[in-house]
Image: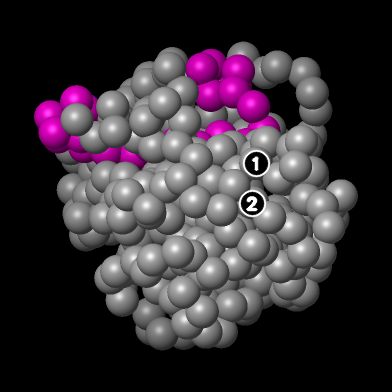
Amino acid sequence: MKKIFSSILTSIMIFSLSACGTDTSQNQLPDLSDEIIPIDNSMTNASSTYGTEIIITVGDKIITAELDDSDTARQFVDLLPQTISMTRGRERVYYGRINKGSLDYNAEDIVVDAENGDLAYWFSGNSLSLFFNVTEGNSDVNSGIVVFGKITSDLSELYEMSGSETMLVSLATDETWETESQLESGSSEIALTIGDTIVTAELYDNDISRQFVDLLPQTISMTRGRDREYYGDIDGSLNYDEDDIQTTAEDGDLAYWFSGNSLAFFFNITENNSDVNSGIVVFGKITSDISVFDNIDSSTTVEITLID
């Protein structure tokens, strides 16, 4: 019976609009209104047991949440800490791809309606989703989500954020992350200088990022590829965990293309060109406006330095 239910849900996911996506014309549900709607911050899912606390750091803001006692929540904890690039969708949710793996879930836990404060797994996009402005008229998530936590902070802080945000997710009890790693993340910002243009990027808190920092500063000759990326040989090489290899890219990804021992960054990804069959390891995100790459020559020299 579960297999039949899962098949039905899969069919629905293929043909229904998603609550999360980067292509406004196809995947991302349209904004209902620019008007701020009063936000209900109550935790209404009383059937779940909450306890494990996490913090979501966005710049100088800290959002708190509690995870439930499900297997999905425990798997998510095992992937922490991590940095996720989140996009605002339909003026009610932030969503972003989980970088370090995917989560298993039970088909019976899938819901097609969201509530304010829901922290959920959008399995169709392997993404974390944070719902902050749900009303009776926009609660639908036809492709399905698995809720495994609740935001306990004031949800209005999410409403005040921009359309794209980098969020650092960690256990609230992880003292090492709250002290040393956050400071390290603050210092792991780099500048990519291309002529008179300066592009900034933030590196993730992982081993491959630290190896890359040790190679800085350096100048890389980079080539435009498939009108979606720039890539160029690194002076030195980077070790990586095979579990971190992925075969798709997103806009703003800063990655190690190990097959060519190259740095790569992506700026014009669509549904039809996101594949990187040879594999990459993403270890950072560009934080500048990526549209600047539209005007960069097909071959260019990029000077990369650590920002103090």
Query: Going 77% across and 64% down the picture, which residue do you hit?
Result: 299
285 left or right of 75 in image: right
Say above or below: 145 vs 44.
Answer: below
Image x and y of residue 137, in percent:
70, 36
- Inspect this view and state whether residue 145 appears: no
Mark 2 vs mark 1, CA separation in Å: 6 Å
Q: Which mark is residue 193?
A: 1
Q: Are marks 2 and 1 in contact (CB under 8 Å)?
A: yes
- Closest to the observer: 219 or 107? 219
Image quarter (top left, top right, bottom left or bottom right) of the N terminus = bottom left
Q: Which mark is residue 302?
A: 2
- Closest to the observer: 24 or 84? 84
Magenta highlight range:
156-179
Q: Amino acid at mark 2?
A: Val
Query: Going 45% across and 64% down the picture, which residue do you hit?
Result: 235
Query: Going 76% across and 36% down the picture, which residue do you hit?
Result: 196
